[in-house]
Image (tube, helix red, strand yellow):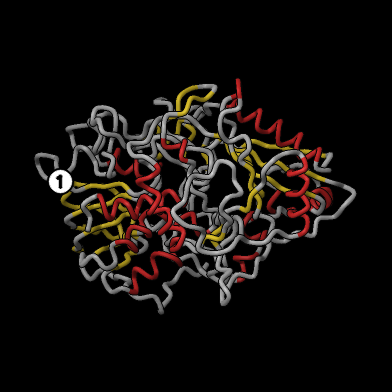
């Protein structure tokens, strides 16, 4: 696979010696790190973004279901281990410039206003955030502009208040999805246009193909963190990028209050990265793992006087639901345009249930992981007559759901899903809804520990250093010059895609966290 640098991208750093120096080192080039670099591009600081991967190549295989899903051509993460069973698995993370946004479904909703307060669920309490929705709202608006979000205000009964409309009009439904929306309205439900980050501007590059959700974009038309945030940051001349560089540990001064160097390996060679300020944006699992690997004798892990680093790991309880009408073929190409939040907030004894949204259109290769034993002709028939949905319910924080690092350095993830009963009710209601809409055959499969794309919670934010890792501005309580800008700091997971919230908070941290 060609992973060479694009010669047209400015700001690429090639170390000439064993040490590099900058003002702010941002470790990780995914949604959080890239958006932070964008926010700091005109700050006057010398910003260095450090990414363990390289640029994901644009090539014909980007649009090949066989290459992407069967061969797993772009899955380049190391194996992790299930702490409960010892089973080795390959997580759903991608080490590239842009991180997981290179293959995400480009759904970019805001969290609900209620998600920022304590929420009582059937199986526990979702924690309050250390700041309200109102503080993040202007940054949500800016993030929607940066990431070219298309949507329609006023349709979703749970949507939070907005200071303005969406930057771009919603992506139109194709006929089968529009018909489904009508059928749901006939049931008294309120479907809405999914907030979507693709380039459908008048001169935009998006062609609304069938290879978007889960695929890299051959045209650069998906609103990923590489295209929308990092490349404009690099063009400023104040931001540099160091690829193929894995940070292995953070070293501190003798009192343990300041990070003085990030130890790294660049193309197999040892490298020291010196900065005045450091920001971790490696993803919730890898940020926690890096802090744990950086133990310095004072605590079991850097920034861990609270003992909370790695704990409260959350991912969404999620299910793929395939609804089949064998009487009518599906001719939908770009399916991921419809959402439903009627059951997102409190629903009597069941409590909040979660979000329903259409998936990118499944085909035999993309559905094979859901039904590995079905013959290909049967998969072709089912996916050729289906509407495909993704259901998410909130996972609740639990101290024993945690990320650890074993003596060999391997990552171990201990996760027992919390709040499954409401999720099962969401599946039941959605299946009934789809049968009423004319889809008599329903298949549902819940995702397990391998699906890590919505990970969060391993370095929680809070005002009390005894119970949290970072303060409300995402600066580590224990250190004067370390911040976190991914989803590690989330006190709760909510029940919608976290990408826009990560981006909005990165903009907030740049302004309010003392980085400018």
Classed neighbour count for the residue bearing mark 1: other residues with Cα under 10 Å, few (<14), some (14–19), many (≥20):
some
Q: Nearer the viewer, residue 157 or 418?
A: 157
Residue 43 at least partly seen = yes
| 45 vs 493: above or below | below
Q: Quadrant of residue 447?
A: top right
Return the residue at label 1. 258
Answer with left or right where residue 374 lies relative to residue 142.
right
Q: How many dots with numbers?
A: 1
Q: Quadrant of residue 391?
A: top right
Seen at 73% across and 60% down, the residue is 174
Seen at 23% across and 65% down, the residue is 43
Q: Quadrant of residue 71?
A: bottom right
Answer with left or right where residue 160 lies relative to residue 45.
right
Tell me residue 321's x, y (percent). 70, 41
Tell me residue 495's x, y (percent). 53, 39
**Which residue in the rendered view is the most extreme toward the left?**
254
Tell me residue 269's x, y (percent). 28, 60
Residue 405 at least partly seen = no
Seen at 79% across and 60% down, the residue is 331
Tell me residue 56's x, y (percent). 49, 65
Which quadrant holds the C terminus? bottom left
Q: Nearer the viewer, residue 203 or 8?
A: 203
**Which residue in the rendered view is the most extreme toward the bottom?**
8
Secondary structure, mark 1, is loop
């Amino acid at each position: 696979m060609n992973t060479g640098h694009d010669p047209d991208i400015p700001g690429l750093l090639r170390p000439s010696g064993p040490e590099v120096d900058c003002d702010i080192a941002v470790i990780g080039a995914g949604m959080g790190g890239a958006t932070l670099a964008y926010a700091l591009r005109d700050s006057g600081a010398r910003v260095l973004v450090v990414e363990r991967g390289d640029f994901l190549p644009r090539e014909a295989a980007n649009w090949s279901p066989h290459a992407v899903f069967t061969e797993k051509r772009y899955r380049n993460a190391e194996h992790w281990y299930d702490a409960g069973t010892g089973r080795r698995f390959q997580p759903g993370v991608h080490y590239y410039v842009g991180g997981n946004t290179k293959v995400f479904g480009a759904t970019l909703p805001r969290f609900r206003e209620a998600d920022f307060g304590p929420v009582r669920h059937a199986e526990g309490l979702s924690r309050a955030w250390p700041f309200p929705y109102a503080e993040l709202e202007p940054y949500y608006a800016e993030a929607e502009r940066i990431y070219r979000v298309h949507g329609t205000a006023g349709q979703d009964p749970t949507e939070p208040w907005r200071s303005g409309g969406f930057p771009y009009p919603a992506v139109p439904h194709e006929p089968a999805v529009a018909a489904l929306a009508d059928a749901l309205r006939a049931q008294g439900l309120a479907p809405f246009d999914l907030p979507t980050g693709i380039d459908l501007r008048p001169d935009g590059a998006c062609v609304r193909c069938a290879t978007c959700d889960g695929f890299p974009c051959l045209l650069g038309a998906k609103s990923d963190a590489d295209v929308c945030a990092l490349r404009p940051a690099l063009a400023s001349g104040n931001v540099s990028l160091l690829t193929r560089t894995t940070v292995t540990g953070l070293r501190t001064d003798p009192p343990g209050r300041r990070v003085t160097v990030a130890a790294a390996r660049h193309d197999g060679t040892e490298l020291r990265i010196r900065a005045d300020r450091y920001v971790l944006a490696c993803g919730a699992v890898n940020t926690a793992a890096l802090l744990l690997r950086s133990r310095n004798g004072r605590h079991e892990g850097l920034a861990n006087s609270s003992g909370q680093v790695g704990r409260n790991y959350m991912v969404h309880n999620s299910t793929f639901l395939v609804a089949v009408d064998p009487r009518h073929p599906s001719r939908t190409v770009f399916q991921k345009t419809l959402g439903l939040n009627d059951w997102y907030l409190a629903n009597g004894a069941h409590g909040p249930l979660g979000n329903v949204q259409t998936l990118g259109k499944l085909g035999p290769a993309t559905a094979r992981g859901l039904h590995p034993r079905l013959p290909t002709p049967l998969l072709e028939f089912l996916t050729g007559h289906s509407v495909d949905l993704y259901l998410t319910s909130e996972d609740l924080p639990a101290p024993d759901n945690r990320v650890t690092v074993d003596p060999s350095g391997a990552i171990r993830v201990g996760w027992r899903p919390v709040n499954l009963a409401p999720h099962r009710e969401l599946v039941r209601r959605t299946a009934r809804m789809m049968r009423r809409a004319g889809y008599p055959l329903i298949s549902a499969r819940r995702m397990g520990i391998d699906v890590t794309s919505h990970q969060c919670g391993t370095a929680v934010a809070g005002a009390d250093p005894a119970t949290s890792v970072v303060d409300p501005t995402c600066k580590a309580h224990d250190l004067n010059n370390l911040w976190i800008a991914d989803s590690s700091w989330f006190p709760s997971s909510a029940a919608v895609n976290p990408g826009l919230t990560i981006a909005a908070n990165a903009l907030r941290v740049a302004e309010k966290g003392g980085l400018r």
